[in-house]
Image (spheres, rainbow, N blue to C red):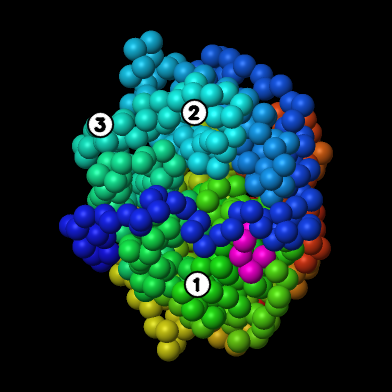
Amino acid sequence: MDMFRFDMERPLVLPSDGVRFFRDIDFEAMPATVPAEIRTVVLEKAERWLGYIFPVIPASAYTLTRRNGNRYNYEILLVDRWMALFDLMSAELITRQGRYIEKIMDVVWMNCEMSTWTIQSHTDYMLPTVDGSSYDWLELFSAEMGSLIAWAYYFFKDEFERRVPTVFNARIVYELRHRMLDNFMENAKVGDKRWRWFCAGGNWNIWIMTNILNVAGAIVTDPEEMDRIVKKVLTSAQVYLDTFPKDGICPEGPRYWTLSCGAFIDLLEQLHDLSGGAIDHLSDPILRTMLEYNMYFIKPGTATFNFGDAEICLAVDSIFLRRIAKRIGYEEMERYAASLYIDAKTSYLQQTSSFYRRLRDLFSSAVTTESKEPYEPPYPRYMESLHTYFDKTEQAPLYLGVKAHTNADPHGHVDTGSYIVYKDGAPVLIDPGLDCYSTFNWNYKMTKYRNAGWHNTMMFNGCAEAGGGQFAASAQCCSLAQRSFSCELAKTFAPEAQVRSWSRAWKSEGGAITVTDRWDIGGEGTAEMVLMTRDKPRIVAEEHKLVLDTVGVSVTYDPMFTPRVELLEESGSLNSPEISREHTTRLDFYQIAPRLPYEKPTVIPYPSSLQWGQPYLYRVVLRTVANHATVVTIIA
């Protein structure tokens, strides 16, 4: 897919009025354009920062990640410095009265004074180095910080200059060049582990490239320099695209769609802006496939097929999806995105990963509550690149999602052959999601939320599936006409499990989903089928059933199994100070609003249709001593 090859071979011709973002937006009209309910929440968030004095970030917080895996103590202090700029700049742009300029300057200067913008888990340094070589590590957090400072300069540099002539703006430009642009242009090369994301697949590449382009568009005035920067950005972006699956599936899972595919779409919009439309790839078919991914992984008003590191109920930037769909003429996606829309305030709070995207969303007609008939994509659907299968029963309906790839997918779990089932959006068989990034485990794929023992898989001789690229499914076979999918899974286990064969097949018929397992483990041993549920199932032993009364679904299992039910974790209190923005381990299906450090979190519950009652996490283990068998599990 040679999207950028031609752009890299020709000179970048900038418009006569120079480099400029948002050519189609009149920021002077912004105060009258932003919906009142969004304006209210923007100003409320900004006002909280005005009197706030930021604490010094201690060395002990930075080094804690390397010492015991704790990322949260440092990152919450760093991210608050992002969010302050995010909120204060948004408020100033929609009021245009200068009320927030001084605080914006304070935060910008404070951030320029930081010895590093990186996080410790992304570098090899225990602390920033004396000689400044730690600046060589341009990673996600440092790129995001640089981008936000660049936006402050882009929008308010004239006001900065009026208040503090020469020095203030010069410091901004110096830091952005030293830490980002010059660093990137002089040092980024393939094969250097410090730049492992450069010319590589994955969200790091495209997310950082988007931020580099933001910075260049804000501070670079020389057309030749801009041409060199854009071409290097496109060189890396082209490799991202070359490695991206052609069927549009995001390899890193639904949680990373906004930071991967979403960032790629941001990049296309920014290129269109900066070139005055000369670089225009917004009509490329890949955008449709990227957008379509969401239709299958995220169900309107319900929950997520959250394979990999993803929350069970994932908040989606529905305004962004609808805006891009409208721009490229994708009516079905417009209708789907409209069905994700909750309200303007909640949808606005979902957008915290791209300041560029936030401003475009604020000016978009998609912010309105205009409704369209909801759209549901056709079923079944097979995404072959990662062997992911989706179906929906004709009655009930039950929704099925299956993952049958490898145990080494980026941000993936050890869960090949696992599956997820919902009934009209209510959880039946679930993936427990991710724990959180507040702690960091260097062998993270084997933490409890990521290992196969906490997914809807099987265990043999007490062994769960093993992590690594060599532990993969094979012989995947999909029949859309028969509404069935099957695969071989014996190679997902290490030798000590003694699995000679294990195959699994799924089929949708009427109002039921049938799962057929066949295995052979040779001599004496045990086989255990694991089923993860949100609600405690009721065992009806005489009928060989597990009944989930709250959702009205039963799971009929083979008589050879003996069931047991384990309560793995109970929901935490919504008022608990330990709940962070990413704290999904306790399965509180709520959106956690950004907050100031050391205050209680503000918890914004979803509408009642999205609240799943009292959430618990249960594991059902069906155990047998049969060393070879064929069993059928019916979910209806």
Q: Which mark is residue 82?
A: none
Please report whichever mark, 1 or 3, sits nearer to the chain's N-terminal start.
Answer: 3
Q: Is residue 168 above or below residue 4?
A: above
Please report whichever mark, 1 or 2, sits nearer to the chain's N-terminal start.
Answer: 2
Q: Which mark is residue 187?
A: 3
CB contact under 8 Å: marks 1 and 3: no
Q: Which residues are magenta?
A: 362-367
Return the residue at label 2: 169
Name the spot of residue 289 as percent of width and height, x first. Answer: 42, 71
Q: Hey, what amino acid is under mark 3?
A: Asn
Magenta: predominant secondary structure element? Answer: helix
Q: Is 113 left, or right, of 493 in this rendering?
A: right
Q: Is 45 left, or right, of 216 in this rendering?
A: right
**Magenta segment includes 127:** no
Name the spot of residue 136 as percent of width and height, x first. Answer: 33, 26
Return the residue at label 1: 327
Name the spot of residue 418 as percent of width and height, x first. Answer: 49, 61
Q: Is residue 459 among what the camera can see?
A: no
Residue occupying image coordinates x 44% and y 16%: 127
C-alpha separation, residue under disc 1 versus residue under disc 3:
37 Å
Q: Is residue 359 among what the camera can see?
A: yes
As drawn, the residue found furthest toward the top would be 130
